[in-house]
């Protein structure tokens, strides 16, 4: 596992857990030291996604101090995923993942082409996006751009079924490439 | 901006100037990058308190000049040798004061083809908390070997900027320079990486996965070359052929250049003597100064060649193979493979050999190699050997198909090498049977074409260092020698009273020489050298050679020229013993000449070597021990030689 | 001693008990061309040596290939973590391996 910064939130960190398969939502209770940190409020908010856990530290605490103990606590808790109490929130997690992806290098790529992509919502594995700027009225080659967003999202949220362009003035269309060939 | 070159402290300092350090493992391409950034604007010095070389230079960025420091290569910040300790101390802000200022930013140089192992060092470096940027080298090699990495994803996974830099790509180096301007904005990892082995391995796997790292295939080119070069039979053949070519090049290629230098200085000397009216000044300038400087410069071609060859072998990657092949042999002498490079260098001059011991992690190995290095037949012994072998062995004599003189020369080389190995073994044992903290290990890097500029810079630095060290000592010695041989000067009355015609230059020089201070010294040490068969004239030669071997030939030449200025060699052969039981007999008999040769095989006759040993060990103790044991050894072996040759001749 | 060095010096490396009882396989027992996975180190290998082996790529869980041997079968070149590293037999004897 390794930790990555979360765009726009200095107190948050996303732990990337390649070997794990977690439920998506908000962590309420956990075994061992992780549960203790959660209960004590050291970890203000913990959200889970299939291959990662995003945590925010309470005000006044720094990751320089808490990084090592939190890592150890998380590693120990991962041995007992069954005991995790997660308040499910599939749609919310998909939205968060998509927003995170758009804040990163994929989003930079979109913006470098003069485009603007916003997440409007998600439901049941279908992600709704609005394409603006140079993206609105974009030709077929824009599909490549959209599939980048899709694969980046899918890497973190394999259950995504469809990425839909819900831009105003156009019929809602799926920009998911080969939706049936890919398995979550 | 000020520059300090004394023994400790930063080489370059300057208020408000940003300082960066390059950190990475050996073979990561760090030094090539350093040269690309600093060019020839690099200075060398030492870290305070330790004999670890320090390289600092300036590079210009949009925001002005910044200092760049090339830290010693290391695999870890858990150090096992002095140079690794230096790296950890430079990187620790808490230690940062006395002379090792903490860098403002770090440039971690990692080989993209060895990313899995290199991330271990990066984890340690990130742990220091200093602003860091990652430079990925050999990305072209990675692609060639069907590997790949997503540098943007790698940067996201690590939390630091990643800059790929291929050797020779100026725009990439320029991109790095621009990066150095904005060190205050460098991103840092959210959480510091773990250090415990299990967690660190998991961290590495996770990061490499995120970066879509495609593992490079085995470097087939290197594999195929190694199949030959490291083959038990063919590898050894190639090795010896390389060594042989090594020496042939040093002596054959350098020889003509040496000839030019010699004749140039000879001509300068004659011109000086003709044009300077005052005979003393003429002698001082002609013989002492020009002779001294010439004596040093004569060796420069050989030394330069040695450094060039070693730089090339190292740049290609063959030196680690040589150390690998020689490790077992070195182990017999209590050393390890790397010591081989030191001893090899000592064939040209013990000074670079002694300096090369810095690469040995074990202090015991360093000392043992240092004590042994002067026994390797260095090039300063050559003029002496040539002179004495010419006296000992007739020109046309043959041993089987080979010239007898060549055979004797080869034998002396072998004797030197065997004695060095034995001495290393003895000092290893004396150093204690402490189990090595870390037995020999060596990375076998991919074979690469070295950048000519890197080799050129390395050679330039080595040559200037050599000139500085040796030049002063030989110059001082030659001048002192000249003075001792030329004074006290004799007035015409004195000459007349002794029956010497003041207008006969030859007779006057002979008289002055016979009654000079040097002659007094030569007579004074007669009891020591009598059993070896030397008379006061040889003694002067030996005494002068204690400072620098090459002066022996000059001294004997001066002594011979005093008797026969046209053919000093003939004068030497014709010399007879003046007094004592052998009076009237030739001085340079076979047993005496042989003992003199053997004396030169063993004695430590080089103040420069002693000076360098003092610098490398920080004390006079070890050079003193070296001088002492080698003198005793030389005396004993010379006596043995005289006795043995006396039985057969 | 620097802060980071002190931290790194506390690293724990797994050691296995006495060799030879059940014939724990070590790196020294392998032939050129063999592949194995490192499982731990011999108890008599000093801790600093073990830590350095980890830093060189001979880490527990890592895969190692035997590449070639020197003429006297010592040292031997191994491939670990995509790099080639030569170590002496005395070190190889202290590295325990299992089937990859």
Image (cartoon, rainbow, N blue to C red):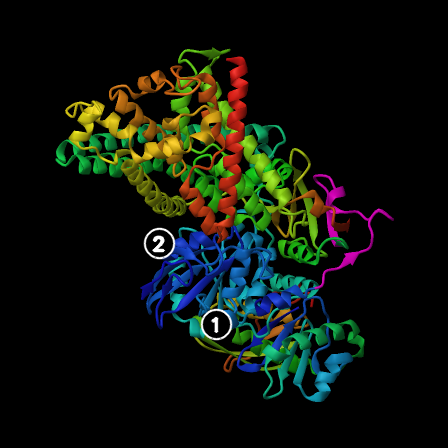
In the picture as drawn, the residue positioned furthest to the front comes out as B497
Q: Looking at the picture, does residue B266 appear above or below residue B200?
A: above
- Do the residues indicated by labels 1 and 2 lie within the same chain of the protein? no
Label 1 or label 2, whichever lies nearer to me, is 2
From the image, tell me which residue sits under label 2.
Answer: B39
Q: Position of residue B273 (x, y in %)?
A: 17, 32
A114 on left or right of B288: right
Write down the chain letter for disc 2: B
User: Where is residue B113 drawn, in percent x and y?
Assistant: 55, 52
Mark 1 to mark 2 CA distance (whole Å)? 36 Å
**Is residue B76 highlighted in magenta?**
no
Disc 2 element: loop
Q: Quadrant of residue B294?
A: top left
At a point 17% along the width and 34% down the height, the residue shown is B279
Magenta stretch bounds: C12-40
Drawn side of residue B176 relative to residue A75, left or right: left
Badge 1 local density, few (<14 within 10 Å), some, or many (20+)? Answer: some
Whether C16 is among the magenta residues is yes
x and y percent of residue B494 in the render?
19, 30
Q: Where residue B649 sits in the image (x, y, percent)?
A: 50, 13
Q: Quadrant of residue C30?
A: top right
For mark 1, give the secondary structure: helix
């Amino acid at each position: 596992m390794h930790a990555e910064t979360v765009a726009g939130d200095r107190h948050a960190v996303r732990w990337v857990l390649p070997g794990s398969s977690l439920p998506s939502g908000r962590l309420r209770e956990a075994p061992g030291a992780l549960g203790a940190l959660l209960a004590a409020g050291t970890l203000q908010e913990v959200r889970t996604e299939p291959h990662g856990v995003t945590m925010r530290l309470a005000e006044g605490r720094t990751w320089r101090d808490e990084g090592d103990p939190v890592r150890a606590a998380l590693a120990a808790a991962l041995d007992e995923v069954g005991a995790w109490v997660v308040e499910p929130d599939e749609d919310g997690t998909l939205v968060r993942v998509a927003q995170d992806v758009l804040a990163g290098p994929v989003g930079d790529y979109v913006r470098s082409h003069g485009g603007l992509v916003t997440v409007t919502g998600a439901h049941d594995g279908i992600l709704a996006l609005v394409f603006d700027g140079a993206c609105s009225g974009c030709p077929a080659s824009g599909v490549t751009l959209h599939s980048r967003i899709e694969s980046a999202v899918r890497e973190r949220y394999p259950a995504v079924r469809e990425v839909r362009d819900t831009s105003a003035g156009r019929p809602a269309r799926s920009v998911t490439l080969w939706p049936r060939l890919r398995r979550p | 901006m000020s520059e300090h070159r004394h023994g400790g402290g930063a080489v370059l300092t300057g208020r408000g100037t940003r300082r960066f350090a390059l950190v990475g493992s050996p073979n990561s391409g760090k030094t090539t990058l350093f040269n690309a950034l600093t060019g020839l604007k690099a200075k060398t010095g030492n870290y305070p308190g330790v004999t670890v070389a320090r390289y600092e230079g300036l590079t210009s960025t949009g925001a002005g000049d910044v200092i760049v420091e090339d830290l010693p290569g290391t695999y870890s910040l858990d150090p096992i040798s002095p140079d690794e300790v230096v790296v950890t101390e430079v990187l620790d802000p808490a230690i940062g004061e006395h002379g090792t200022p903490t860098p403002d930013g770090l440039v971690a140089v990692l080989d993209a083809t060895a990313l899995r192992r290199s991330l271990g060092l990066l984890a340690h470096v990130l742990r220091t908390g200093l602003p860091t940027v990652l430079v990925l080298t050999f990305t072209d090699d990675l692609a060639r070997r069907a590997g790949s990495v997503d540098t943007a994803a790698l940067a996201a996974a690590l939390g630091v900027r990643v800059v790929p830099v291929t050797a020779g790509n100026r725009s990439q180096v320029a991109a790095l320079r621009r990066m150095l301007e904005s060190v205050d904005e460098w991103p840092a990892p959210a959480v510091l990486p773990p250090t415990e082995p299990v967690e660190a391995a998991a961290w590495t796997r996770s990061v490499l996965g995120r970066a879509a790292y495609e593992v490079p295939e085995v470097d087939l080119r290197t594999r195929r070359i190694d199949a030959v070069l490291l083959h038990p039979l063919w590898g050894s053949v190639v090795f010896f052929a390389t060594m042989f070519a090594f020496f042939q090049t040093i002596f054959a290629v350098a020889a003509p250049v040496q000839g030019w230098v010699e004749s140039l200085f000879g001509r300068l000397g004659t011109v000086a003597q003709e044009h300077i009216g005052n005979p003393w000044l003429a002698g001082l300038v002609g013989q002492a100064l020009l002779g001294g400087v010439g004596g040093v410069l004569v060796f420069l071609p050989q030394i330069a060649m040695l450094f060039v060859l070693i730089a090339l072998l190292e740049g290609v990657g063959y030196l680690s193979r040589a150390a690998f092949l020689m490790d077992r042999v070195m182990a017999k002498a209590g050393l390890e493979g790397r010591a081989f490079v030191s001893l090899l260098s000592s064939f040209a001059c013990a000074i670079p050999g002694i300096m090369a011991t810095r690469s040995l992690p074990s202090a015991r190995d360093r000392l043992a190699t240092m004590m042994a290095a002067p026994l390797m037949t260095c090039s300063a012994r050559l003029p002496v050997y040539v002179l004495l072998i010419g006296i000992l062995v007739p020109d046309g004599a043959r041993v089987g198909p080979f010239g007898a003189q060549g055979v004797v020369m080869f034998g002396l080389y072998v004797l030197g090498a065997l004695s060095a190995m034995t001495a290393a073994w003895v000092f290893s044992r004396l150093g204690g049977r402490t189990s090595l903290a870390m037995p020999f290990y060596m990375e076998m890097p991919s074979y690469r074409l070295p950048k000519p500029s890197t080799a050129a810079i390395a050679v330039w630095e080595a040559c200037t260092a050599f000139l500085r060290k040796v030049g002063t000592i030989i110059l001082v010695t030659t001048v002192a020698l000249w003075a001792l041989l030329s004074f006290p000067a004799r007035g015409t009355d004195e000459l007349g009273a002794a029956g010497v015609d003041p207008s006969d230059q030859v007779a006057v020089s002979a008289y002055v020489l016979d009654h000079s201070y040097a002659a007094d010294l030569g007579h004074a040490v007669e009891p020591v050298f009598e059993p070896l068969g030397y008379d006061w004239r040889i003694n002067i030669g030996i005494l002068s050679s204690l400072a620098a071997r090459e002066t022996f030939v000059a001294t004997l030449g001066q002594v011979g020229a005093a008797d026969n200025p046209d053919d000093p060699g003939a004068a030497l052969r014709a010399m007879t013993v003046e007094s004592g039981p052998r009076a009237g007999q030739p001085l340079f008999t076979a047993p005496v000449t042989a003992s003199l040769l053997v004396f030169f095989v063993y004695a430590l006759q080089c103040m420069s070597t002693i000076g360098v040993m003092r610098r490398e060990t920080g004390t006079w103790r070890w050079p003193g021990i070296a001088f002492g044991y080698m003198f005793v050894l030389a005396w004993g072996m010379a006596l043995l030689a005289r006795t043995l040759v006396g039985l057969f001749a | 001693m620097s802060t980071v060095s002190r931290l790194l010096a506390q690293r724990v490396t797994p050691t296995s008990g006495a060799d030879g009882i059940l014939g724990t396989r070590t790196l020294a027992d392998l032939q050129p061309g063999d592949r194995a996975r490192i499982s731990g180190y011999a108890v008599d290998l000093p801790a600093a040596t073990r830590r350095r082996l980890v830093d060189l790529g001979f880490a527990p869980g890592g895969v190692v290939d035997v590449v070639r041997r020197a003429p006297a079968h010592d040292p031997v070149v191994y491939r670990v973590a995509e790099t080639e590293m030569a170590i002496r037999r005395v070190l190889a004897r202290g590295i325990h391996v299992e089937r990859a």
